[in-house]
Image (tube, rainbow, N blue to C red):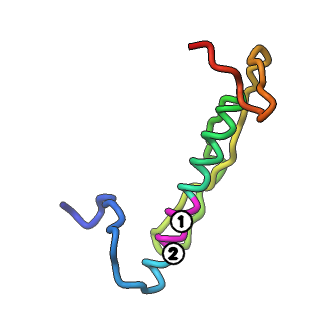
Amino acid sequence: MSDEEFIPVPRRAPEDKRTRAIRLLADAVHQANEMIRRAVDTGLSVELIRVSRYHDGRGNWGDQMIPTVREDKDAPLHDDGAPSSTS
């Protein structure tokens, strides 16, 4: 594997500045995924769109995202806000 390939984040790694930043980012992505699931369960379709790319001037970059949503106006809602299941 070359140094330029992306690799999975190890489960247990020593906490340094970079590792903490990676862990915080991973946690935020997991939280965003949970919020996306909840939104979909209420009858929305969700798509993340890259709106910009941040560069640090040393060759490192990161995509910055916004959500776009489409509402399913025909999805009947339960009292808890979730669409009713037809299956």
**Which residue is farthest front?**
79
For the residues bearing labels 2 and 1, Cβ distance under 8 angstroms: yes
Numbered range of the magenta stretch: 22-28
Q: Residues within 10 Å of mark 2 (few under 14, many from 20)?
A: few
Identify the main secondary structure in magenta: helix
Closer to the camera, 9 or 56?
9
**Which residue is farthest left?**
1
Is 40 positioned to the left or the right of 72 in the image? left
Residue at left offset 48%, top offset 78%: 20
Q: Residue 65 carries which label?
A: none
Q: Residues within 10 Å of mark 1 (few under 14, many from 20)?
A: few
Horizontal and vertical percent for residue 15? 42, 84
Q: What number of labels is visible? A: 2
Q: In this view, does 1 lie above or below 43?
A: below
Residue tagged by mark 1? 25
Is 13 positioned to the left or the right of 60 in the image? left
- Displayed quadrant of residue 18: bottom left
Q: What residue type is labelled 2?
A: Ala
The answer for how far apart the CA atoms under marks 2 and 1 are is 6 Å
Is 33 positioned to the left or the right of 71 in the image? left
Which quadrant holds the C terminus? top right
Q: Which amino acid does label 1 sit on?
A: Leu
Residue at left offset 33%, top offset 74%: 12
Closer to the camera, 75 or 53?
75
Horizontal and vertical percent for residue 1? 18, 60
Q: Is residue 37 above or below residue 13?
A: above
Label 1 secondary element = helix
Residue tagged by mark 2? 21
Horizontal and vertical percent for residue 67? 69, 43
Horizontal and vertical percent for residue 42? 72, 31
Residue at left offset 62%, top offset 36%: 47
Label 2 secondary element = helix
